Image (cartoon, helix red, strand yellow):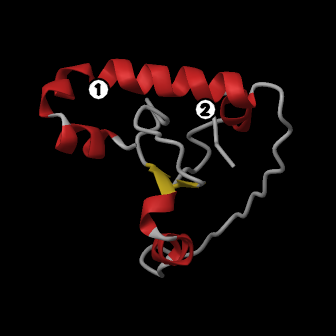
């Protein structure tokens, strides 16, 4: 269940959302800790305003794409979306930081 679904059914749980997120992350980490996951990386580049982001969002469905736009806290709002789109990265985030992060992508 998503946080929105939980709050729709039980509004009193709204103050527990951060705890639920941590529990959800702990469960995913345990489940996929030792699983090899085949990843695919696609670089899309071009002039501003040519539809690069829109293409990614529409090709993969908006709800399945996590957009990284805040490079100080890039995965703070990550919620197990299947695709990750790094907006205008310009090397703002090192590849090693991405690979070593503790984000879990469920299959």
Nearest the camera: 83 or 93?
83
Circle nearer the viewer, 1 or 2: 1
Q: Give how far across and how far down residue 86 sits, in percent.
A: 55, 52
SS of the residue at dot 1?
Answer: helix
Badge 2: few (under 14), some or many (20 or more) residues near its Cα, within 10 Å? some
Q: Is residue 59 above or below residue 20?
A: below
Q: Give how far across and how far down residue 95 sits, in percent.
A: 72, 38
Say left or right for 64 vs 77: right
Q: Residue at coordinates 70% horizontally, 64% vertically from top-left?
A: 43
Q: Is residue 1 above or below residue 49?
A: above
Is the C-beta separation of discs 1 and 2 under 8 Å? no
Badge 1: few (under 14), some or many (20 or more) residues near its Cα, within 10 Å? some
Q: Residue furthest bottom?
A: 50
Q: Is residue 84 above or below residue 58?
A: above
Q: Give how far across and how far down residue 28 sits, in percent.
A: 61, 30
Tell me, yes or no, if residue 82 can be seen here.
yes
- The mark nearer the N terminus, 1 or 2, is 1
Mark 1 highlights which residue? Answer: 17
Mark 2 highlights which residue? Answer: 103
Q: Residue at coordinates 56% horizontally, 40% vertically from top-left?
A: 92
Q: Residue at coordinates 20% horizontally, 26% vertically from top-left?
A: 13
- Residue 16 location, quadrant: top left
User: How many marks are shown on the rendered structure?
Assistant: 2
Q: Give how far across and how far down residue 93 sits, in percent.
A: 59, 38
Tell me, yes or no, if residue 87 can be seen here.
no
> For the N terminus, which image quadrant?
top left
Nearest the camera: 57 or 50?
57
């Amino acid at each position: 269940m998503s946080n929105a679904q939980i709050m729709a059914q039980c509004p009193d749980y709204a103050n527990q959302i951060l705890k639920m997120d941590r529990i959800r992350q702990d469960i995913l980490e345990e489940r996929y800790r030792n699983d090899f996951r085949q990843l695919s990386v696609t670089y899309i580049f071009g002039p501003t305003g040519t539809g690069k982001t829109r293409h990614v969002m529409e090709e993969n469905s908006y709800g399945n794409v996590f957009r990284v736009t805040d490079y100080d806290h890039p995965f703070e709002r990550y919620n197990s979306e299947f695709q990750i789109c790094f907006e205008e990265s310009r090397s703002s985030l090192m590849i090693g930081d991405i690979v070593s992060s503790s984000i879990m992508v469920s299959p």
